[in-house]
Structure formats: C-alpha cells, structure tokens
Amino acid sequence: MNWLSPLEIPLIRNALLGIVFAGGTMSLLGVMVLTLSLTGLRFTLMHVGLLGAALSMSVGANPTLGAFVLIMLVSVFMGTLGDKVKLSASSLSGFFMTGSLALAFIILSKAEVPAMEVFGIFAGSILILSTVDFAMIILLGLVIVAVYIVGYREIQLILLDKELALTLGVPVGKVNILMFLLLGAGVALALRLVGALLVDAVILLPAMAALPLASGLKQALVLTSLFGITAAAGGFLLALYFDLPIGSSVALLGAVLLGFSYIIQRRK
C-alpha cells in the first residue's frame, strides 16, 4: 500500500491541512513572543489551557473549546488588570501555572476521566480534529494575518521601541492586549494540534529559526511562515511514512530547521 494512501481519508487530509495552516499562521505569533520576551507568558497560558480542557472533559464538552475560553479570560485579566494588582508579572505567572495545573489534576481525578483522554491533552490529537477545531484554526490564522497586515506599522514600531511608539501615538496598551488574546488563542489550539508538551513546535520554533536570518520584520514574518509550513507538512508526512506520533515529528523537524538556521547564521 502506498504510504500516502491515508491522505485519501478526509479526516487525515483535514488534519494535514489544519496543522499546515496553523504552522504558517500561528507561528507568526512567535515573532512577537520572542521579540517582546513573552516566552514565559505562553507557558503560563498553556497550564491555564490544561485546566480549561480538564473542566470541559469533566462535563463531556469539547476540551479545545474549554481551553480556549479559559485562556481568553486569563489573557484579558493579565493584559488589562495585571498592572493594577500588587503582584509582579512573574508572581502572576507562577500563581496561574501552579494553581491551574493542580486544579486540572484534581478535576480529572474526581471526574474519573479515562487515562487515554488525559494523555491526549499532553500528546495532542490532530487526527480527531473536529469541525469546530478546524474552523477555529482557520479563523484564528486569518485573524493573525489580518492583524499583521492592518497594523504592520504599529507592530513594527512597538517591536523596535515601545517608548518611541507611545510618543508617535501608537496605542501600545491596546496592541499588547490584542497580542495577549491572539497568543492565548494560539496556545489553546496548539494544545489540540500537538499537545501541551509540544506547543512550542507550532508557535516558537519557526520564529526562532527565522529571526537570526531575517534583516527586518517583513522578512522575519515570511521566513517564519515558511519554516512553520515546512515543519508542519514535513513532520506530518514523516509521521505517515515512519508511523510516528505526528506532534513529535513536527517538533523534531522544527528543531532540525532551527539547527540549520544557527549553522547558516554562524557561517555568515
């Protein structure tokens, strides 16, 4: 049997389209995450997403939707109210990370959620992507691209110098909140695609590979998207050929691309 024959099955074909689209669009969030030093935030939101998924699974609802809703609520809180509470950013992150993970395990235990479903949260379940999941991936990807196109000048100024951006009248606070929300949504959907342990495969690795090679924001975005698509499509096909976990294959290829990027950078 041809190793590509599984792609004739609509479910598997949609999974490939979903992860490739995510790789080409959600990876763009990584450019801002890395440039603005928000890597700790995505880790916090990942733990919050686990709690949201656990809450949904305990009542038989869609775990992706539960993760999405709770992450959005926490993103709004951290983006708008974080400066008003007497806690540092690291304290807030620690509070949400530890508290969310503890509550998630308690809820999963008390609800007697099957072990394989719990494992699915950590390992991802791209092959059982629902219509709702697929629609959310497409919608979020289009929103991310639209935000970069419409607000390219403002985003570029913020990444260059926040103080300068404020001086020139850029609504830095509103843009930050928007980026919190987009990152939160990206983390929630990445949980579904590759699992909690491999979220960075979709969001960070492509940008990490692209930024050292880029000479400007536009080039960084293009390279990030290309690396994201390559890692997603290549990882998926490698998984089919060698019968490997899809999320792990995508992450491994992303790491290989990152290694090549560093080699090229050093030679330059």
Image (cartoon, rainbow, N blue to C red):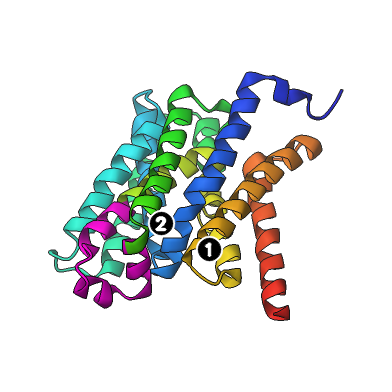
* Extent of the magenta region: 154-180
The image quarter in which residue 95 lies: bottom left
Residue of label 2: 42
Q: Is residue 118 magenta?
A: no
Front residue (pair 150, 175): 150
Q: Is residue 109 visible?
A: no
The Cα–Cα distance between marks 2 and 1, rounded to whole angstroms, is 20 Å
- Determine the image quadrant of residue 206: bottom right
Q: Residue at the spot x=23%, y=65% of the render?
A: 170
Of the pair 76 and 66, the residue shown nearer to us: 76
Q: Percent x, y for residue 198?
A: 56, 50
According to the image, label 1 marks what residue?
A: 220
Q: Is residue 163 left or right of residue 240?
A: left
- At label 2, the amino acid type is Arg
**Amino acid bearing label 1:** Ala
Question: Mark 2: which secondary structure?
Answer: helix
Q: Mark 1 falls on what kind of element? A: helix
Q: Which of 51 and 20 is in front in this view?
A: 20
Question: Mainly helix, strand or loop, the magenta region?
Answer: helix
Q: Do the residues labelled 2 and 1 touch (CB within 8 Å)?
A: no
Left or right of 197, for residue 47: left
First in residue order: circle 2 vs circle 1 = 2
Tell me if residue 256 comes above or below residue 48 in the rendering: below
Q: Quadrant of residue 89?
A: bottom left
